[in-house]
Amino acid sequence: MTRIGSVTGSARWLEAGSGDPVLLLHSISGSASGWREWMRILADAGFRAIAPELPGFGAPPLEPVYRHEDYLGLLDGLMSAADGSREWAAMGDSLGGLLALQLCGRGRIGRCVLLETPAVFPYPWLRPVARAGVDLTRRRPIASLGARLVGSGLGRRVMGAFDLIYAADPTVALQEASNVSLPPLPFLASVMEAIAAADLREFAGRVRQPVLIVVGSRDRWAPTAEAERFVRVLQRGRLHVEAGFRHGDAFHRPGRIAPVVIEHLRRTDHLRDPGSSRRATH
C-alpha cells in the first residue's frame, strides 16, 4: 500500500496490474481491501486497478464533516500522482459510485461504472433522519457512547447490518464489516446526510462519458425502478440488472457481472447514439 499527498490531505491505495488505470471507490461500510477480487479480475483483463482507502473509513477524516467536494479534490490529486498522463475509468460501489459519477465532470475520467449506487435523486425520508443523527451526536454523552460503540466489534457488526439486511450472503457482509474501521459517529451521520441530500439530476444530464449502472433485481437500497429513472437522465447510460442480486452482491460477488464490466471498460464504440440507453437482465 502506497501513501501520497494532495492539496486536501493524503490517501493510501492498493493496486494491481498494468495498463489503463481504473479507480475503485468503496462504500461507507467498505474498504480498499474489499476490492481485492475485483482488482485481480481487472489486472487479468489488462487494466491497472487502484483502490484508495478513503479517509474517514479506516483513516482519519479529511474534515469533521463529510463533503463530496473534499474527496473529489483528494481523488484528483491521487490520479495525478499515480498516472497523470492517461485517461482513467472510475468504478464505485454505493457511496463510491456517487463520487465516481461526479469525477466525470472533472475532465480525467473517460468512462464510469456504478455498482448498486443510490440514484442521483434525493432521498427525502433519509435526510431528516440523518440530520437528527448529526444533532444528536453533538451532545457530549451521546458522542462519548457512540465513539465507544463505533470502536468496538459490536459497532462494526451493527454497521454491517446496513448491508446485511439486503445481502444474499450474510457471512460475507459480516466479515467485511469486521475488517472496517468505522468513522467517528458525527462524521458518519454527515455522510448519510450528504447521500440523502444528493440531487445530481442536472449534473448527470451533462455527463457525456459512457456510464454503466449495475444493480441487483432484489436490491432495495438501489432499486431497479430508481436505476431506470437514473439511466434515462444520462446521455450515454446503460443499465444492467443482475437477477437475484441484493445490495452488496455486485461488490462481493464479482464473478457473474465481471464480463459486463470488462466489456464496458474495453469498448470504443460504446453507444454511438448519446441519447440511447439499454437494459440487460440476467
Image (spheres, rainbow, N blue to C red):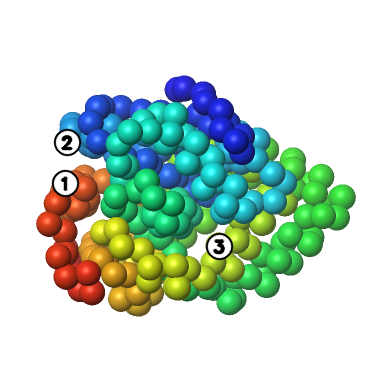
Among the two numbered marks 2 and 3 on one chain, the one whose residue lies closer to the N terminus? 2
Q: Earlier in the sequence, mark 1 or mark 3?
A: 3
**Residue situated in front as seen by the camera: 175 or 106:** 106
Question: In the rendered view, would you say 19 is above or below 121?
Answer: above
Q: Which secondary structure lies at badge 2?
A: loop
Residue 90 visible in image: no
Look at mark 3 in the image and give the residue it sits on: 195
Q: Residue at x 39, y 55 (%)?
A: 104
- Quadrant location, the N terminus: top left
Q: In front: 198, or 155?
A: 198
Residue that sits furthest to the right in the current view: 140
Q: Amino acid at mark 3?
A: Ile
Image side of residue 123 versus residue 90, left or right: right
Query: How many angstroms separate mark 1 from mark 2 (CA)?
Result: 9 Å
Mark-to-mark CA distance, 1 and 3 = 30 Å
Can you tell which quarter of the image residue 166 is in? Answer: bottom left
Q: Amino acid at mark 2?
A: Ala
The kind of secondary structure element at disc 1 is helix
Query: Do tag 1 and tag 2 residues touch (Cβ < 8 Å)?
Result: yes
User: Quick one: quadrant of the C terminus?
Assistant: bottom left
Q: Is residue 136 left or right of residue 259?
A: right
Q: Position of residue 76 (x, y in %)?
A: 47, 41
Question: Label 2: which residue?
Answer: 45
Mark 1: few/some/many CA within 10 Å (<14, 14-19, 20+): some
Instruction: Decide: few, some or many residues near mark 2? Use Cα within 10 Å; few <14, some 14-19, many ≥20.
Output: some
Residue assigned mark 1: 266
